[in-house]
Image (tube, rainbow, N blue to C red):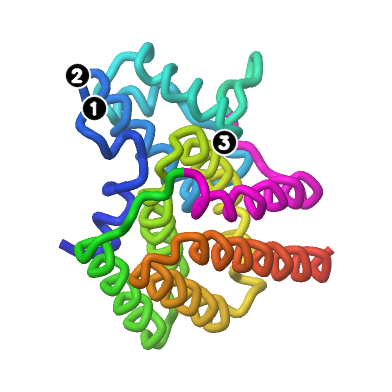
């Protein structure tokens, strides 16, 4: 199976990656992760209307469980329910984006402070595989933006998996998915080769810190890259105005 096929489905850091307690829970998580990934990968771009009827038919469920998923996505800021219109995928303005990135930067440092979970050989092996996949994508004559996006998401789940403080993990995940699609929207104006190189360096540095057990360093490295990512997005967004 191709990496791109499994990356959006296996989320080691998500609560949904833990064993479900019922078929209903499994169904909820399957639909939730599917819709969230589509929004984050811009398959449903900002402003898109999500048809309850079509989604219920696609996932072979009634509208009741689907509405529970849409409610969760609305709480997380990814969609908005509008009376007389339906469920619309939200957008994020630069000012709002800056505030979210500022919070993400401060929370990143806490990753290595609040009950961090030690990583082991299997975890390191998965991250090395992500590094190899990044190298392979970088060598392709026509860069695949969505493949890099899936790679970024897969690496985020490795970071999330080391967060032992559950409230911190939940808000870290929520803010990541709120802002991730903005990066993807900005990529055409950014230099994808540069973005890939920067991202690879972040993965390599974090892996090195994990391997020696310096989990505090993981948080600081993560904070630095979140900060630089926002600065690049803001610079190109303002240049395009």
Q: Position of residue 185 (x, y in %)?
A: 61, 59
The quadrant holding residue 28 is: top left
Left or right of 7 on screen, residue 147? right
Q: Residue at x 47, y 53 (%)?
A: 41
Q: Which residue is mark 2?
A: 22
Q: Position of residue 217 (x, y in %)?
A: 52, 66
Q: Position of residue 166 (x, y in %)?
A: 44, 35
Q: Is residue 194 above or below residue 85?
A: below
At mark 1, the secondary structure is helix
97 inside magenta stretch = yes
Instruction: State the mark number for residue 35.
Output: none
**Among the two numbered marks 2 and 3 on one chain, the one whose residue lies closer to the N terminus:** 2
Left or right of 162 on screen, residue 44? right
Q: Which residue is mark 3?
A: 78
Label 2 crowding class (10 Å Cα cut-off): few <14, some 14-19, many 20+? Answer: few
* Distance from the alpha carbon under mark 3 to that under mark 1: 21 Å
Label 3 crowding class (10 Å Cα cut-off): few <14, some 14-19, many 20+? Answer: many
Left or right of 53 on screen, residue 193? right
At mark 2, the secondary structure is loop
The quadrant holding residue 156 is: bottom left
* Distance from the alpha carbon under mark 2 to that under mark 3: 26 Å
Magenta range is: 88-114
Q: Residue at x 69, y 62 (%)?
A: 230
Judged by depth in the image, the label closer to the viewer, 3 or 1, is: 1
Q: Which residue is mark 1?
A: 26
Q: Are marks 1 and 2 in contact (CB under 8 Å)?
A: yes
**Among the two numbered marks 3 and 1 on one chain, the one whose residue lies closer to the N terminus:** 1
Q: Residue at x 61, y 43 (%)?
A: 46
**Residue extending farthest top:** 64
Q: Is residue 18 above or below residue 67?
A: below
């Amino acid at each position: 199976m191709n990496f791109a096929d499994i990356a959006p489905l296996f989320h080691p850091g998500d609560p949904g990656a833990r064993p479900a307690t019922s078929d209903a829970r499994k169904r909820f998580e399957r639909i939730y992760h599917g819709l969230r990934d589509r929004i984050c990968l811009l398959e449903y771009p900002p402003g898109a209307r999500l048809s309850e009827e079509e989604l219920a038919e696609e996932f072979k469920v009634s509208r009741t469980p689907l509405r529970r998923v849409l409610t969760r996505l609305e709480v997380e800021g990814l969609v908005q329910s509008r009376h007389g219109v339906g469920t619309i995928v939200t957008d994020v303005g630069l000012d709002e984006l800056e505030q979210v990135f500022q919070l993400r930067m401060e929370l990143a440092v806490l990753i290595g402070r609040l009950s961090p979970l030690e990583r082991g050989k299997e975890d390191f092996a998965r991250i090395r595989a992500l590094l190899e996949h990044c190298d392979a994508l970088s060598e392709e004559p026509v860069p695949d933006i969505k493949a890099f996006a899936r790679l970024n998401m897969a690496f985020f789940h490795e970071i999330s998996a080391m967060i032992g403080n559950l409230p911190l993990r939940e808000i870290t995940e929520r803010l990541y998915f709120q802002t991730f699609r903005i990066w993807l929207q900005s990529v055409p104006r950014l230099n994808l080769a540069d973005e890939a190189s920067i991202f690879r360096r972040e993965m390599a540095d974090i892996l090195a810190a994990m391997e020696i057990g310096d989990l505090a360093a993981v948080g600081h490295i993560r904070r630095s890259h979140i900060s630089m990512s926002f600065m690049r997005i803001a610079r190109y967004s303002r240049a395009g105005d």
